[in-house]
Amino acid sequence: MLTYIRDRKLGLRLGLLIMLFDQLTKSWALGTLGEGGQTVIDGFLKYSLAMNRGVSFSFLADVPHDWLPYGLAVFAVIVSVFFIHIMAQGSALYQAGLGLIVGGAIGNMFDRINYGGVIDFISVYYQNWHFPTFNVADIAINIGVAFVLLDTIKHILKKESDA
């Protein structure tokens, strides 16, 4: 068991750190942000509380579905367990990427179970254009996917140069 944990130490630590930071920032958002939100950079960045009851970028948010939060939470747990199992098979970049993905997925899973949706509060906009509101877990998941893709590309290029 100790070997199992040691081989995944980087990813597990990063995942735990992201999960905790995500929950702390969401707790701050719930306790601090009111109706109008809080402007950070005028004309570009605002903290504005939103509840995403759908999936990525509020997809399916308007469809009535009492089961969705729990179904997504179960899916996130299954994927997280799978990622933790394969975490030791890659480089530090790969492990970090999976740790970011797992930490973010678990952070959002907690929201779905506790609130029936994901707490989002970071709003990026310019004039009439608004990017969908997101949170720290979403940032971690996207960076994690980029790390895994970079590691995969690096391995493909290495195999091609060795051939």
Image: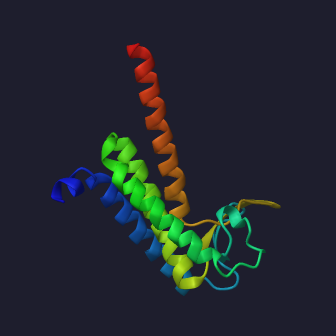
- When the figure is inspected, residue 22 is found, relative to residue 8, above or below; the finding is below
Depth check: give the residue in front, 81 or 42. 81
Q: What percent of the width, then of the height, locates residue 113?
A: 53, 80
- When the figure is inspected, residue 28 is found, relative to residue 142, above or below; the finding is below
> Which residue is drawn at the image coordinates 42% and 15% (left, top)?
161
- When the figure is inspected, residue 149 is found, relative to residue 22, above or below; the finding is above
Q: What percent of the width, then of the height, locates residue 94?
A: 39, 43
Depth check: give the residue in front, 36 or 41. 36
- Residue extending farthest to the right is 128
Q: Quadrant of the N terminus?
A: bottom left
Q: Viewed as shown, does residue 155 lie left or right of 3? A: right
Depth check: give the residue in front, 73 or 139. 73
> Which residue is drawn at the image coordinates 71% and 67% (left, top)?
58
Q: Viewed as shown, does residue 108 lie left or right of 7? A: right
- When the figure is inspected, residue 132 is found, relative to residue 24, above or below; the finding is above
Dividing the picture into quadrants, the one containing residue 59 is bottom right
